[in-house]
Image (cartoon, coloured by chain):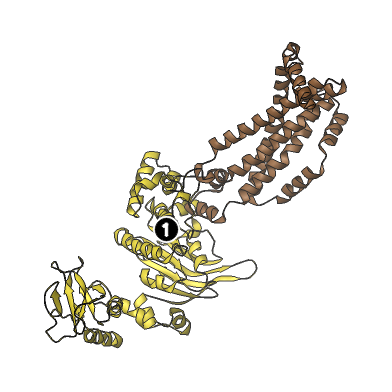
Chain colours: A brown, B yellow
Amino acid sequence: MNWLLSFFGWLGEFFGDADNWTGSGGIPARLLEHLQFSALALVLAMLIAVPLGLLIGHTGRGEVIVVVSANLARALPTLGLLVMFVLLLGASSIWPVIIPLVLLSVPPILVNTFEGIRGVDPELRDAAYGMGLRGGQVLGRVLVPVALPLILLGCRLSAIQVVATTTVAAYTGLGGLGRYVIDGYATKDYASVVGGSVLIVLFALVVQVLFALLQRVTVSPGVSRRLKVR
Amino acid sequence: MITFESVTKRYPDGTVAVDRLSLEAPTGEITVLVGPSGCGKTTSLRMINRMIDATEGRILLDGEPVQGIDPPTLRRGIGYVIQQAGLFPHRKIVDNVATVPYLLGWDRKKARGRAMELLERVGLDPALARRYPFQLSGGQQQRVGVARALAADPPVLLMDEPFSAVDPIVRTNLQDELLRLQSELNKTIVFVTHDIDEAIKLGDRVAVLRVGGTLAQVADPKTLLSEPADDFVREFLGHDRGIRRLQFVSTEALRLRTDLTVPEGGAGGASGEPWLLVVTGDGRPVGWRSGERPGELEPYGTFVHGRDSMRTALDAALLSPSGCAVAVDEEGRVVGVATRRALDEALAEAADG
């Protein structure tokens, strides 16, 4: 039980230290940084991947982009990519870190959006055209609402990945919650390492919950089948 | 009226789905396209609303070639019902039905009002309007599909095997409902099926297509059954073609006997007849009483005199050990009994044509 005791000891030390709650290195500031980096990268990735996935899924043209992107996502080492961009572009701005974060979050969103649209029952697509909907209306009024659970799943997977990778990005000098872990480790300040880790876990959980709520609000009960059958 | 003028559909790989089809679907009638798989019946149907474009020939809608009309505009003016209903899962039933009115720019209230009216018209409880498609049975979904197709009151309705995915009892109900609707609405309907019985039941005209997309015969169901054009049509119609033809022979001329009924609880059987029909005080049938076993009642079968066909009358006779069919009026009261002899005479007449 010793380790448990020291764990809570460190936690108390970290969260109890008034200095940890103020200034540019304080918890609120680090949280905000983490949120900003993650959100910026995720939003940029969504702006690229969702329209592209919708377009490829709807037209059936350019499927090779989806396949290549899915394979690259598996092949590229996260940290390697980060270090490479920082070495190439320097650490003067946040972009050398944001760009690889975006590149890493595009594939899950792209693949799931594409699969969501492709996977819609062909009969349904047929009925939509048969009723007299135009191509864009078929996409916007039928395919997207039906594929929405998968599209959101892709975004959620990317969000979790971005939150985790932003932590690693502290290694290259970026702010965020990762600083506590990286700096704490370097100076053998274990209270900082443990406290930072707990904050990151909580952050990731909150992101999960937010996406669950978003899904609940935006997906039609007719698609999620949340209601009783009769 | 829908007119096919020597229409051909050839795919890039050289497959010919429809081969120089010339056909008319008259206004206000049900024209059924029937044939085995690969005969191009669905392709033909889908060329009318340009879900598929013809390679050669013209399709005219009241004289205007459909090829000249922008497809979405054309389709909004044509009701379309498909096999699995194809309802939008994310929309409530009422909004599914109002799909085309919304597209045509009706305001929400008017479109929903129209949708509610149609739900009732196709025999659905208005309470279902607020549900989602997955909460409905297959038969109910199919009715919603029909309501959706009718929502903007299009003069033409295309139905692509709409009832083939539901069980036989529900299918019969849906067919009867369609005939009832049609008697009120008089739409120009083109109906595709692979089921010849359905074709004969629903069609004012039946077009039989053969594999390769050529027309084998087009005729009203009675003519089709009595004068099939060739061996293919004869074979496709099946072996009990004769029995099915009785569907088009009226029971009006059937001779009925009124002296074979006895009141319930009353005496009888002394007349020397082997079978007597026991009838309630208000004229409804109870069962057949045999002269040999007066204590037991045997089952009976009924047909509505003048409305039902000879096929129904014959079926009613075969349901009972007495061999006689009970003729009733629309309210189910006995109007007489068709004996074996009477049925025999009527059948002989039917066979003569």
Chain letter belonging to callout 1 = B
The quadrant of the picture occupied by the N terminus of chain B is: bottom left
Location of the C terminus of chain B (image quadrant): bottom left
Compared to residue A26, the image places residue B81 above or below, namely below
Identify which residue, B300 or A24, lies in the foreground: B300
Q: How many numbered discs sit on the rendered protein?
A: 1
The residue positioned 14% from the left and 82% from the top of the image is B269
Q: Residue at x 41, y 59 (%)?
A: B157
* Amino acid type at mark 1: Gly
Of residues B205 and B304, the one drawn nearer to the viewer in this rendering: B304
Direction from residue A57 to residue B225 in the image, left or right:
left
Residue farthest along the front direction in this orientation: A1
Residue B306 in percent (x, y) is at 22, 73
Q: Which residue is mark 1?
A: B139
Res A39 visible? no
Residue A88, percent across and down? 87, 31
Q: Whole-percent x and y of residue A214? A: 58, 34
Whether residue B37 is visible, yes or no, is yes
Q: Is residue B244 left or right of residue A145?
A: left
> Which of the 4 quarters of the picture holds residue B326?
bottom left
Secondary element at tag 1: helix
Q: Is residue A33 left or right of residue B151?
A: right
Residue A25, relative to residue B286: is it above or below?
Answer: above
For residue A216, above or below residue B300? above
